[in-house]
Image (cartoon, rainbow, N blue to C red):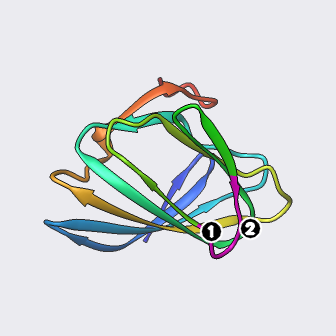
Amino acid sequence: MKNHRPWGYYEVLSDDPDHKVKRIVVHPGRRFSLQKHGKRDEHWYVVKGDAVVTVGERSMVLNAGDSIDIPRCMVHRLQNGGTEDVVFIEVQRGEYFGEDDIERIEDDYGRT
């Protein structure tokens, strides 16, 4: 099932007590909230497109085949500045995987 958001959508591929896996699609010109999570770490693997990823004070471009780890409590964001969808797999590890573990610091869509 696709869960639509202002930036695109995600599908949950696996949801177990010790992990959650999502396939996430971010449309061109869209970006996530600047956010952090208190109860989980994330690993992002880019499948398609070019993503600008910010983790803490550092920003970098991730291309298809690249990956990055996002430690819990670390401020982060993904942005699609390209002309095609960015598709990536997110693996969450930790003690809780609910959407209410998102602390939004800045948001383009009025959700802070």
- Name the residue: 68% across, 48% down: 60
Asked whether residue 106 is drawn in magenta, I would say no
Would you say residue 2 is visible in this rendering?
A: no
- Rendered view: 17 above or below 99: below
Between 72 and 1, the residue placed more toward the observer is 72
Region in magenta: 61-66
- Name the residue: 80% across, 65% down: 84
- Name the residue: 54% across, 36% down: 33
Instruction: Please provide percent x and percent y for residue 63.
Output: 71, 67
The mark found on residue 102 in the picture is: none
- Rendered view: 57 above or below 81: above
The mark found on residue 49 in the picture is: 2
Could you classify mark 2 by the number of other residues whose Cα lies within 10 Å: few (under 14), some (14-19), or many (20 or more)? many
Marks 2 and 1, how far apart at CA: 7 Å
Residue at image mark 1: 87
Where is residue 38, by image quadrant?
Answer: top left
Q: Secondary structure at mark 2?
A: loop
Among numbered discs 2 and 1, the one appearing first in the sequence: 2
Instruction: Please provide percent x and percent y for residue 105.
Output: 48, 24
Left or right position of 98 against 86: left
Left or right position of 93 against 52: left
- Name the residue: 63% across, 76% down: 65
Where is residue 94, by image quadrant?
Answer: bottom left
Name the quarter where the N terminus is drawn.
bottom left
Three-letter residue code for mark 2: Gly
Three-letter residue code for mark 1: Val
Q: Disc 2, disc 1: CB below 8 Å?
A: yes
